[in-house]
Amino acid sequence: MQITGQCFCGLLAYEAELDENMVGLCHCRDCQIFSGSAFRTSGIVPPGNFRFTQGTPKHFDKVVDSGSVRRMAFCGECGSHLCSFPSEEEGGFVSIRVASSHQFDKLKPKTEFFCDSRVAWWPGLEDSAEFPRMFPR
């Protein structure tokens, strides 16, 4: 599915080709903090399936559980976090924050990952695949 999106203030815009089956909820503590919520809804795409169509994002490099680096891309004006990029390792993915997409209401999460840090009051999605840590590649 072709999606488009932007930051809150509209300075940054993007487009991507997203497999609707690759949308999930991340319950890791980092995503809870970054989103200010119990989880973050993300869509996973190969790097060649994503591009910024307007503006240049600011970046923050974050070391993840595996020890690799994720480059977090956000708007320098309004602070909206739009995606994260892989380090140079092969097989990496772009993780799009699908709430920033214009098609958000059509992107139902199919998986939940980092469920070992899911908050106790969230029962989980009905009929979703659940993973205690990151989903297997």
Image (spheres, rainbow, N blue to C red):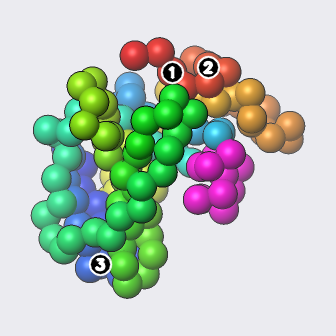
Q: Nearer the viewer, residue 88 or 106?
A: 88
Foreground label between 2 and 3: 2
- The verdict on residue 31 being magenta is yes
On the picture, is 115 further left or further right than 91?
Answer: right
What amino acid does circle 2 point to? Phe
Q: Identify the residue shown where x is 68% and y is 45%.
A: 29
Q: Nearer the viewer, residue 42 or 76?
A: 76
Residue denoted by label 1: 135
Position of residue 65 relative to residue 53, above or below, is above
Q: Which residues are magenta?
A: 29-39
Sequence-first tag of 1 and 3: 3
Q: Identify the residue shown where x is 40% and y is 76%.
A: 8
Distance Cα–Cα, label 2 vs label 3: 34 Å
What amino acid does circle 3 point to? Gly
Label 1 sits on a secondary structure element that is loop
The C terminus - image quarter: top left
The N terminus - image quarter: top left
- The verdict on residue 26 being magenta is no
Distance Cα–Cα, label 1 vs label 3: 32 Å
Residue 79 got which mark? none
| Magenta span dominant secondary structure | helix
What amino acid does circle 1 point to? Phe
Label 2 sits on a secondary structure element that is loop
Residue denoted by label 3: 10
Q: Nearer the viewer, residue 125 or 44?
A: 44
Query: Visible in this render: residue 114?
Result: yes
Labels 2 & 3 near each other (Cβ < 8 A): no
Distance Cα–Cα, label 2 vs label 1: 6 Å
